[in-house]
Amino acid sequence: MASADYDRMKEVKEFAESKIGVKGLSDSGITSIPRIFIHPPQTLSQLKSTSSSSFSSIHIPVIDLSNLDSPHHRPKIVDQIREATKTWGFFQVINHGVALSVLEETVNAVKSFHDQPHQVKAKHSVGEERRGVVYASNNDLYRSEAATWHDYLQVWMAPQPPEVERMPEICRREVIAWDTHAKKVAETLMELLSEGLGLEPGKFKELTFSDTRLFVGVCYPHCPQPDLTMGLASHTDPTVLTVLLQNHVPGLQVKHGDEWVEVKPVPGGLIINAGDFLQIVSNGEYNSIQHRVIANPCKEPRISIVMFFNLAKWKESDSYGPLPELLSPEKPAIYRNFTKQEYDDNFYSKGLDSKSFIDKIRI
């Protein structure tokens, strides 16, 4: 891909500093994408192999959370969630307690933010990656080999929430409300996941597994050459748990065995997936799974609202690993302990990838 007259970093810097985002490029009516977005042949060949098979008829599990407090239904739901997180790493939940009107308001608010002129959005482009509020295109723009076709608004909601006035006014109310709703859903699921491991329902809450929260409102606008790039490269989430709300425009794909499965949004549903951290602390009982987003060929943008949940308080020794309660002579630890510094350095030192940290600490 490299040539004597192509200075990739120069073009990346020019794109980043223009603050136009891919939405601005798309809205300008371009018919070919800038070179920094073109992915290597091996990535693109994987896309072609899946699109030609028109996808299998299998889908990620859909789990109904109604009757959760019923002594008859709860054990069944725990079993369903344990099995889905072990075999798929992904599932959708329905009847999760959040009103359809709230889901629609949240999606519409994020879309309204991205629909603003780039000069307005650019006011939020100055910030730090690890705190506060940031608008950008690709969080790993300078670290990855090829850029992907999406823009995002990122808000760190906890443990240190930003000053309210720093949040974009056009979606401020909805972002704050969504943090509350998504946290409630995540904590319910963490109870069920904890029970699925034979632990007390409150164990994950006690370990502060929902106390670091990152809101990311992503826009995947129309791409004029979707066969040359990605919406989001294949990766696993480094966190404990992810709660995803999306509009009806497809694009998310999950790796299941050797094939990529398209995630078809269920009306009113939320998509849940396990992160690398959950795989480690569960000593491999739960799995974080590769997923990606294909570049959007539709005229309508794909809107995706992601809430990442991670722990806030590291143990006194500042190290984490498989939970001791899950270990025995028959089931020894398959991962070593690691520090917060190791964990952070791994994520922020490179582009998005899959399980690189898990591979580093595997015994």
Image (cartoon, rainbow, N blue to C red):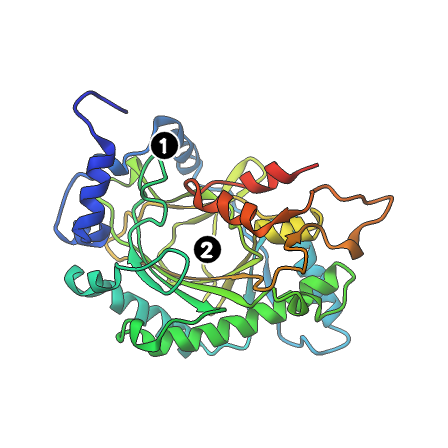
Dot 2: within a 10 Å radius of its alpha carbon, few (fewer than 14), some, or many (20 or more) residues? some
Amino acid found under the numbered disc labelled 2: Lys
Give SS at disc 2.
loop
**Among the 4 quarters of the image, the one containing residue 233:** top left
Q: Inspect this view and state whether residue 95 appears.
A: no
Q: Inspect this view and state whether residue 220 appears.
A: yes
Residue 103 percent coordinates (x, y): 41, 73
Q: Residue at x 65, y 69 (%)?
A: 205
Q: Is 269 or 134 nearer to us in this picture?
A: 134
Mark 2 or mark 1: name the one nearer the start of the chain.
1
Q: Is 263 or 117 nearer to us in this picture?
A: 117
Q: Which residue is at the far right?
A: 329
Question: The N terminus is located in which quarter?
Answer: top left
Amino acid found under the numbered disc labelled 1: Leu
**Among the 4 quarters of the image, the one containing residue 135:** bottom left
Vertical placement of residue 322 versus 162, above or below: above
CA separation in Å, label 2 and label 1: 22 Å
* Disc 1: which residue: 44
Vertical placement of residue 16 versus 187, above or below: above
Q: Residue at x 16, y 54 (%)?
A: 27
Q: Is 6 left or right of 204, judged from the image as shown? A: left
Question: The C terminus is located in which quarter?
Answer: top right
Vertical placement of residue 130 versus 71, above or below: above
Q: Is 158 left or right of 204, judged from the image as shown? A: left
Vertical placement of residue 196 versus 262, above or below: below
Q: Is 47 left or right of 355, judged from the image as shown? A: left
* Disc 2: which residue: 264
Residue 109 percent coordinates (x, y): 31, 72
Q: Residue at x 29, y 35 (%)?
A: 228
Give SS at disc 1.
helix
